[in-house]
Structure formats: structure tokens, C-alpha cells
Image (tube, grey):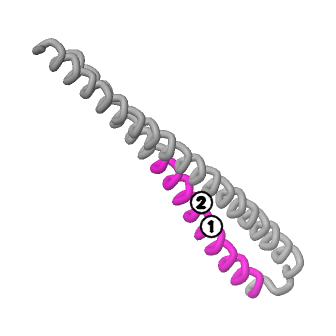
Amino acid sequence: DKLARRVAEIDTQHEQFMASKATAETRMATAAKEADREIRSLRTQNADLQKALDAMQRDAEADARDREAEAAAAQRKRDALELDAAALRNALAEARLSADAAIEAARSECRDALTALEDRAVALDL
């Protein structure tokens, strides 16, 4: 009778562990999917920002060639475009940092979930 109760208790703990494991695996998969979506989004933003930056730099060079006679006006235009380019570079750097942070957060969450599962497994083995 004691043995049957202990077996039932262990079975219950095992079922709880398996449910916890399934929940953690689902969370890890969801976090990975969310991180992948965020990374794809940030890469798209990165590409768009890079295209815009390239276009602005080409425009600045064309303006400088076309307006050599109007050096002062061309210089002001170039300064404005360089400020815009700097803003785009900053946005690009922020997008990269955000992607890195999202990846690290997903990795950390996965590591934490795995550690919790391992701790739970060790506890159940005792």
C-alpha cells in the first residue's frame, strides 16, 4: 500500500514534470519564433535604412557635382544630407543593437528554461 502510494506520487510528479517540460518547450519555441520574426523585421529595416543611406549619399554626390558654381548652397545641402545620413547610421546601429538584444534575450530565456528543466529533472531523480 505504501509502495503503491509512492509509485502514484512519483507518477504524479513525473506527469507534472512532463507538463512543465512541454510548457517550457512551447515557451522556448514561441520565444525563438518571436526572435526570428524580430530579426527578420530588423534585417528588413536594416536593408531599407542602408538603401536610403546609399541613395542619400548618391544624391549628395550628384548635388555637389551639379552645383560646383554654387559652392555655399551645395555645402549647406551636403551638410543637411550628412546629418540625415548620421541619423540613419544611428538608427541602423540601434536596429542592430535591438536585434542583438532580442537574440540574447531569447537565448537567455532558453538557457533559463533549460536550467529550470534540468533542476527539476535532478530534483525528481532524488
The percent position of residue 13, horizontal first and vertical second, equals 25, 27
Q: Position of residue 88 (x, y in %)?
A: 62, 67
Magenta region's main secondary structure? helix
Residue placed most toward the observer, 27 or 63? 27
| Three-letter code, disc 2 | Leu
Tell me if 79 is positioned left or right of 91 in this view: right
52 or 7: nearer the eye?
7
| Circle on res. 60 | none
* Residue 123 appears in the rendering: no
Q: Residue at x 40, y 40 (%)?
A: 23
As helix, strand or loop, the secondary structure at mark 1 comes to: helix
Quadrant for the C terminus, please: top left
Q: Residue 109 appears at what percent x and percent y?
A: 38, 41
Instruction: For the N terminus, give its image quadrant.
Output: top left
Task: Left or right? Give the position of 107 relative to 59.
Answer: left
Mark 1 packing: few (<14 Cα in 10 Å), some, or many (20+)? some
Q: Who's the residue at 10% across and 15% down the image? A: 2
Vertical order, 70 against 37 (above or below): below
| Amino acid at dot 1 | Leu
* Residue labelled with disc 1: 88
In magenta, the rendered stretch is 73-102
Residue 104 place in picture, x, y as percent = 44, 43
Q: CA distance from mark 1 to mark 2?
A: 6 Å
Is-magenta flag for residue 43? Answer: no
Residue 30 to residue 9: above or below = below
Q: Are marks 1 and 2 in contact (CB under 8 Å)?
A: yes
- Residue 79 lies in the magenta stretch: yes
Q: Which residue is mark 2?
A: 92
Residue situated furthest left in the rendering: 2
**Which image quadrant for residue 52?**
bottom right
Residue in the picture at 79% in, 67% down: 55
